[in-house]
Image (cartoon, rainbow, N blue to C red):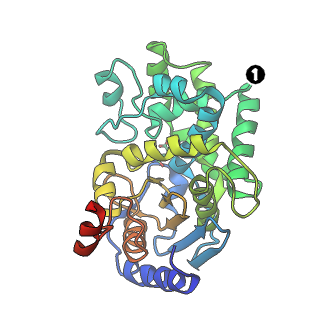
Amino acid sequence: MPGSERVEEAVSAAVSHALPHTEGAVADYIPTLAEADPGVLGVALAEVGGEVHERGDSRLEFSIQSISKAFVYALVCQELGHRAVHDRVGVNNTGLPFNSVMALELNDGHPMNPMVNAGALVTTSLVPGATPARQWDRIRRCLGAFCGRELEVYEETYRAESRTNGRNRAIAQLLASYGRLDGDAEAVVDVYTRQCSLAVTTRDLAVMGATLADGGVNPVTGQQVVPASVCRDTLAVLASTGLYERSGEWLFEIGLPGKSGVSGGILTVSPGKAGIAAFSPRLDAAGNSVRAQRVTAHLSRSLGLDVFASTAATTTEDHTHDQS
Ligand code: GLN
């Protein structure tokens, strides 16, 4: 990572670069999300050394939505291991929207990956716990450890989504009909809806991302939340599926694993370096925040974080030397 001052400058520049972008629309299929102020923009970058750089509305709370999927996946990977999760949930992109029923039908009821709703429902059903209440408690505590503080549910969002989540309930029933869901389908959807309604800030997301970047150690609290191998698996999945059917474009532009949520957050991880979070509610057609994408692209480029970028290790003179 470049020095602190350069990171500060880059974060400020990323905000100025993203602010003029007012295209896109706030999600309205969950009633409380439609009330979000479209003008807000929060940015936070948490380094693995524990330093956090913040700008704009970085302390404003919003529901975590799909970004929770990454962390519940990490929890289940820790409990069940690499192979079992791979077999039950999968790691391949569906190429279809996050709430697609078609994706299930085309794949013999296999959810394909944990970052779309079908795969996330299966992942949530796999969380250890004798009852849905115990599973929920486990999820809330785990996500809290990732961000270093106790998290609470946005009750209003939870209730609004519970009233309007017919599509997720249909997906859960379909998974159950294929024999691919453990437990009661309605109860699984309820726990999933709660996990999506957890209130977080942009700063929280950056610290959660920094924990994934730091071999599972939260750089602010020092707690080992999950093993390093679980972070590695989670980031590999995010790279291929974190932005749904736009994951290829995301990787091409930004070169880092990321995860978006329909409330307007995007979390990006630079392995070994930092967690980057941006929040602004206007979304593109795939449900990804327009400004958060702009902020992240700017930071990835200006801080040299793209994992696919390289420069020649040796000059022509060095080559001569290498061959000796
Ligand atoms: N809770 C939302 C849903 O299930 C999450 C979707 C998202 O953030 N993309 O539809």
Q: Is residue 144 above or below residue 312?
A: above
Q: Is residue 48 above or below residue 104?
A: below
At a point 33% along the width and 67% down the height, the residue shown is 313
Q: Is residue 224 left or right of residue 37?
A: right
In the picture, residue 23 is in which quadrant?
A: bottom left
Few, some or many residues within 10 Å of mark 1 (<14, 14–19, 20+): few
What secondary structure is found at the residue carrying circle 1? Answer: loop
Image x and y of residue 124, in percent: 59, 32
At a point 43% along the width and 29% down the height, the residue shown is 90
Q: Is residue 34 left or right of residue 127?
A: left
The residue pinned by badge 1 equals 130
Q: Nearer the viewer, residue 250 or 108?
A: 250
Q: Nearer the viewer, residue 289 or 15?
A: 15
At a point 59% along the width and 33% down the height, the residue shown is 77
Q: Nearer the viewer, residue 24 or 96?
A: 96
Q: Which residue extends farthest front?
A: 324
Q: Is residue 52 above or below residue 149?
A: below
Image x and y of residue 291, in percent: 40, 70
- Callout 1 amino acid: Ala
At a point 46% along the width and 70% down the height, the residue shown is 38
Image x and y of residue 240, in percent: 37, 44
